[in-house]
Every structure is written in C-alpha cells, then in structure tokens.
Amino acid sequence: MKATLKNNKSEQDHTIYDVIIAGAGPVGLFLACELALAKCSVLVLEKAEDPHSPLKQLPFGIRGLSAPTIETLYRRGLLEQLEIHKRLKNPHQNVVQGPRRQVGHFAGIPFLEGNIDTSQWTYRLPGSTETSLISEMEELETVLARRAEALGVVIRRGLAIAGFHQTADGVTVQSGEQSFKGKYLVGCDGSRSVVRKAGGFEFAGTEPEFTGYTTRVDIVDPEKLSPGRNVTAAGMYLQSQPGYVVIQDFDGGAFHGSDRPITLEHVQEVLRRVSNTDVAISALHIATTWTDRARQATTYRNGRVLLAGDAAHIHAPLGGQGLNLGLGDAMNLGWKLAATIQNKAPECLLDSYYDERYPIGEQVLDWSRAQVAIMKPNSDARALNSIIRDLMDTRDGATYFAGRVWGVNSKYDLGSNQPLAGRSVPNFELEDGTKIGELMRDGRGVLLDFGRNASLKTLAGEYGDQIKYVSGSAKEQLGLSAVLIRPDGIIAWASDNNLDCSELRKAADSWFVCN
C-alpha cells in the first residue's frame, strides 16, 4: 500500500478506519506501524503542522533506549535505521573511560559499567541486542513516520482533536469543521491528552515537588558551572554541552503551573540559586518547563477508546523511562487491537493490555517518585542519597539499578510457573545462523520447536497464519524443547523435554483463535 499524507486543508475524509490515533509522536507512530503491519487501516491525527521542533534536537531530544525497546525495534527491522547511537555518547553523563565508565544513573547517582554483573541476567544470550542505547527523538520519529508511510498509514498534520463521540460500533472524531470515523480511537496525545479528558478517564496520582527547566542559553562565564549532573543543596543542574542547561528547582511545581513567561532574568535567578554561583546569562534562546507530577489513568480503556504513552501515565523524565514505557504500550496494544478488530482474538484479549501494562507503568511512576525523594534539598533526602550511593557502588547494587533502568528483568505475570513465561524471548540463534528476532519482522506469533516435533507443527497449523512454525536446534536452548512467542516477542509458553501439548494448546487459545 502507498501512504497518504494529507494536510488540514484536504477534503472531507469519509473512510471508516479500523483505528484513529491521536498524536504523531513516537508512541502514536509506532502503534500505527504495528496496526498497519497487521493489515489494519490507520489514520493518525497530529495537531502540530511541523514535526520538527528545536526541543527534539540535540541535546534536548536525547533519550536512552532500554532493553525491551531495543529488542522491539530490532524485531521490526527498525534498529538498524537509527544512526545516532553509533556515533554519540550520552551528553548527560560525566563519562569516565575504562571499566569505571558511567553508563546510567538513579537520581543523578551514577552506576558504573565495571560494577555490573551481567551474568545475573540469566536469559540474555550471546548475540543479544544491547541493554541500552542512545537515540534522538527527531530521528526516531522520522524513522517511524517513514515506516508508517510505507505501510499505508494516513498521517494528517495540523489537525487537533476537539472531541469525539463513541457508539457500540465505532468512534466519530471531531477536528475543527472536519470529522473522521473509526472503529477504535487511541489517545497517544501526550500528558495533556484531549482524548483522556474528553473520554472521562480518571488520572490519579501525586502533585509535583519541583519545576524543571530545559534551556539553551549563552553563558558569559560557563566555567563557574561544573560539567555534567550536579545535585546541590537547592536542587539540581546539568550542563551537558556548552550552553545547554537543565535545572530542577524544588518549588512544588509552582512556576510550571503559573502563567508567568520564562524570561532570561528568571532562568538566571533560578540557575544562580540552584548552582550557588553568580553565573551570568547573556541570551536565552530556548526554554521549556516540566515537573515530576506522577499520574496514571485508572483504566486504559473506555469502550472503543484507549490510551497509550503519556496520555496514560506521566512522571518526571529522570532516566528517560517515559519514552520506553510508551513504546512498550504500543507494542503490547498493537497486535491485540488488530486481532480484536479482525476477530482473531479471544474476547478478553484487549483487556489484557491494561492488565499487563498498568503494573509496569505503576512501577515506573514509583521509580520516578523514589528518585525525587532522595533529590530533595533537605537533610533526610541527603541521608538517603548517601546510602543509595554506597549501594550503587557495589556490584550487586549497580547490577540491580542497571537492570531496573534498562528493563532487563521486565516480565508480565501470565499465571505460569515456567520461569521464562511472560519474559521477552531470548534471541535464540538457530543452526543456520538465523536469529529469532529476525523471524519476527512480520508481526506474527511464532512456535519455536527445537525438537522438530510433528505434533507441534500440526498444532501451529490449526491457528492459520497467526502462528508461524519454526523448527531446528539452536546454539543455546536454555534447556528448552519448544517456545510459543506472542507477536510482541513475549513468551506465552515454554517447555523443557517433558512436552505437554495440552498446556501448549491452552496457552495458544489464550492469545489466538483456532481456525
């Protein structure tokens, strides 16, 4: 299919789309790609006419990609299209070369590469993708938009959603004088989501402790500021590159919640107070504010309306986990929504989106709150900070924090006692050199049979094109004889040499409809 990109002056669109997505950020675009890969018709509505923004460019748009995100992009053939991580080190880190190189942080406290014991991550095989990489928001959006266009997604920019009306059969979305019809609507329209507000979703959580500032400035005397991330008695400031400064001011989020303009004088006053210097700013080029408000929708679905990404959950961008959380939502939701639309799913499949993703979001919000708690400018926080710093300087401590930040041990509770069930499938390498991640680019489920069992091939065939049967031994099989993999790369079932086809069928029926 050829993509169609329309602007807001186009004629009325009378198509009834399978899915309308609000928001053409990375989450909305990736969800569109997943749906289109499964042969759904998709319309993306984006309020901004121009996808390019100074805040998405270096270094503001730099994000760390976690292990699940990297695996997701790899399984769809998108990882190789990202170039920036191949040439860029994280500008937000005080990089120390050698085995003590900083590779991440928790509340500004670094964990070091030489301290991380990767042998504790039992299910990561040789040849697996990286556990963390650097990406740029603008590059990621460009790659995803190009992918969506190639799959036939209709992207219309300059169209803000004003509201919608849903019935038992579909959703009508209003944008200015135009309306659009779809079977489902997904709000990927950010922290101030119109879809969430118009849909009546409860957004529960906690209020902010600070106002964050992201700025590009001309500094008269930059030597007065220490490079990298600096936690101070009044807050935090980060000078990643000359002229690029991030500040956290513990004002209870008061400035962000006000209507006051972000002036040069205000930024200078805050920076001086937080850094405890008399640094001078001669020009303010770009400035935006943000907070650590932590909220989460109490449900991700209301009838034919769903939420994903920042529309479903917001938190402080400490450690860059928001992008990864949102892309995880899209990967989990895409195949389930497509299967529901095409009647290839059990009745309850779409409900499992919330069941699986809400606990992950809840963990990330608590992780964010914990970081803020030990960054506060008071004696209690400083005491906790000191203890956490000591823990992170140990091998087990660094491994734990790295595993959490990079999502290495992420797992869904599928109600199975099998240790691999609910985990991202290891990148098994078959005897012909093919890796399992390379076999998942078509977005189908996979039954991986290491023992070439004829009964497994027959069973997979009962589910038509939903499950691809792959057989052959692997270089490392982790003691397994067969594995059922969902389209999102999650292991639904695994067996050792004591193969139980009844358990396999039960698992397959939970995720796929038998022909």
Image: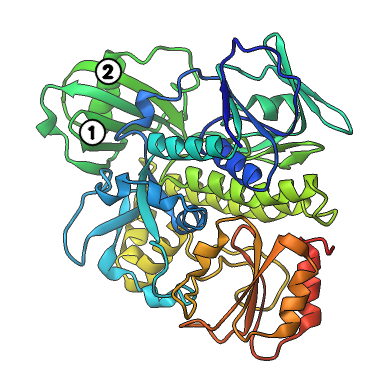
Q: Residues within 10 Å of mark 1 (few under 14, many from 20)?
A: many
Residue 387 rendering spot, x and y as whole percentages: 35, 61
Residue 84 rendering spot, x and y as whole percentages: 31, 44
Q: In this view, does 450 lie above or below 484?
A: below
**Residue 294 image-quadrant placement:** top right
Residue 54 rendering spot, x and y as whole percentages: 35, 24
Please identify the quadrant where the N terminus is shown.
top right
Residue at mark 2 to residue at mark 1: CA–CA distance: 20 Å
Residue at 51% from the left image edge and 58% from the top image edge: 75
Q: Is residue 357 above or below residue 316?
A: below
Q: Is residue 193 left or right of residue 302?
A: left
Question: Which residue ends up furthest to the right in the rendered image?
Answer: 168
**Residue 21, label in figure:** none
**Element marked by disc 1:** helix
Please identify the quadrant where the C terminus is shown.
bottom right
**Residue 384 image-quadrant placement:** bottom left
Q: Residues within 10 Å of mark 2 (few under 14, many from 20)?
A: few
Residue 213 rendering spot, x and y as whole percentages: 36, 28
Disc 2 and disc 1 in contact, CB within 8 angstroms: no
Q: In this view, does 246 lie to the left or right of 161?
A: left
- Mark 2: amino acid: His
Q: Give the residue number, with chain letter if any, for mark 1.
A: 275
Q: Is residue 502 left or right of residue 108?
A: right
Instruction: Examine the rendering and report whether any part of residue 51 can be seen.
Output: yes
- Looking at the rendered structure, the number of numbered marks drawn on it comes to 2
Q: Give the residue number, with chain letter if any, for mark 2.
A: 285
Instruction: Examine the rendering and report whether any part of residue 380 can be seen.
Output: no
**Residue 514 image-quadrant placement:** bottom right
- Mark 1: amino acid: Ser
Q: In this view, does 61 lie to the left or right of 173?
A: left
